[in-house]
Amino acid sequence: MSRSGPGRRRISPLALTLATVVLIKADAPLHVRFALSEPSLERHARSVRDDHVSGRWWGLFRVDDVERI
């Protein structure tokens, strides 16, 4: 079975490039990263103490400084 038969659609490199540029300009990677990390960041924020160890990863973000307000 051929992958490039008459019923098979191909995505053009131009369309793929334009879609990538639009997603990056819209900060889609940052929004996805935050959405995936939000539960971990929320747990960390609720449990923050004065003896916080810097340089830890919470979700997909590295947390260096925490301030309790």
Image: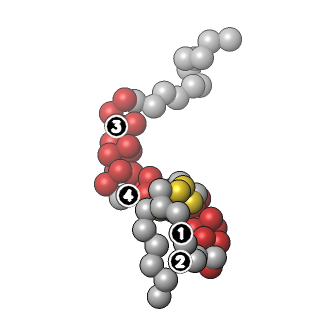
Label 4 element class: loop
Evaluate whether residue 31 shows in this view.
no
Which residue has dot 1 on it?
52
Evaluate whether residue 63 shows in this view.
yes
Q: Looking at the image, is 17 positioned above or below residue 26?
A: above
Which quadrant holds residue 42?
Answer: bottom right
Q: Looking at the image, is 37 positioned above or below residue 4?
A: below
First in residue order: circle 4 vs circle 2: 4
Task: Point out the frontmost of discs 4 and 2.
Answer: 2
Label 3 environment density (alpha carbons within 10 Å; few <14, some 14–19, many ≥20): few
Which residue has dot 4 on it?
27
Which quadrant holds residue 19?
Answer: top left
Which residue has dot 3 on it?
17
**Residue 56 x %, y %:** 53, 57
First in residue order: circle 2 vs circle 3: 3
Q: CA distance from mark 2 to mark 1?
A: 6 Å
Q: Are marks 2 and 3 in contact (CB under 8 Å)?
A: no
Give, as a three-letter code, the residue at label 2: Asp
Front one among 44 and 38: 44
Give, as a three-letter code, the residue at label 1: His
Front one among 40 and 48: 48
Residue in the image at 55% along x and 72% along y: 51
Q: CA distance from mark 3 to mark 1?
A: 42 Å
Q: CA distance from mark 4 to mark 1?
A: 30 Å
Which residue has dot 2 on it?
50
